[in-house]
Amino acid sequence: MPPRSKVAQLPPKVKAWLDQALVENNFSGYELLSAELAGRGYSIGKSALHSYGQSFEERLAALKMASEQAKAVVAVAPDDDGAVNEALLRLTQERLFTLLADGKGPLDISKVGKTVAEIIKASVTQKKYAAEAEARRAALQEAADRIGQAAQARGLTAEEASFWREQVLKGMG
């Protein structure tokens, strides 16, 4: 087993500074960073910093891409009913089942059990949220219909009644 990375052994504040410096320097200037760390009492060569920096940059790029994709999905298909969460739960269930079925490598059965329990709890919560959202939509729709009828009964024009009905339905958005 290879020795633990010198960067991983840095105190949290120094590592946070290093991460920030890497981002600010666009993942370059490793000699200067090595010299700065030496000035702070940490001997880490530019090659080790470059290796860490590459890995960090890749993780950051993957996270950024995932965030951008999630924003694009939400922009195109807002998740009012929790469909994205439901899909994520199903993917997690499928992946866990595949791991169990493959039987490759040791699995900590207590962790698997805990994960299954968390998935079930999340699924129940998701279904409860979807049912509550549907109930809210139905209640708003009913209120809007009643306001429209009441407005017309009190002498408002169909256009005025429609305006008030739409005001109530804005609560659904």
Image: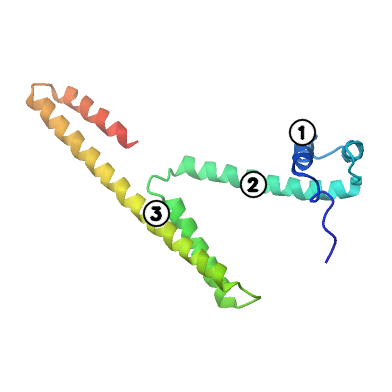
The x and y percentages for residue 143 are 19, 36
Residue 25, by quadrant, is top right
* Residue 22 position (above or below residue 9): above
Q: Amino acid at mark 1?
A: Glu
**Label 3 crowd (10 A; few <14 / some 14-19 / many >=20):** some
Question: Image check: 5 left or right of 80?
Answer: right
Taking the spot 77% from the left edge, 33% from the top edge, the residue there is 24
Colour scheme in the image?
A: rainbow
Taking the spot 47% from the left edge, 59% from the top edge, the residue there is 89
Question: Image check: 157 left or right of 130?
Answer: left
C-alpha distance separating marks 3 and 2: 25 Å
**Label 2 crowd (10 A; few <14 / some 14-19 / many >=20):** few
Taking the spot 48% from the left edge, 43% from the top edge, the residue there is 74
What residue sits right under mark 2 in the picture?
63
Tell me which numbered mark, 2 or 1, is placed earlier along the sequence: 1
Which image quadrant: the N terminus? bottom right
What residue sits right under mark 3 in the picture?
126
The x and y percentages for residue 62 are 66, 48
Tell me which numbered mark, 3 or 1, is placed earlier along the sequence: 1
Q: Are the residues tagged 3 and 2 within 8 Å (C-beta)?
A: no
What residue sits right under mark 1 in the picture?
24
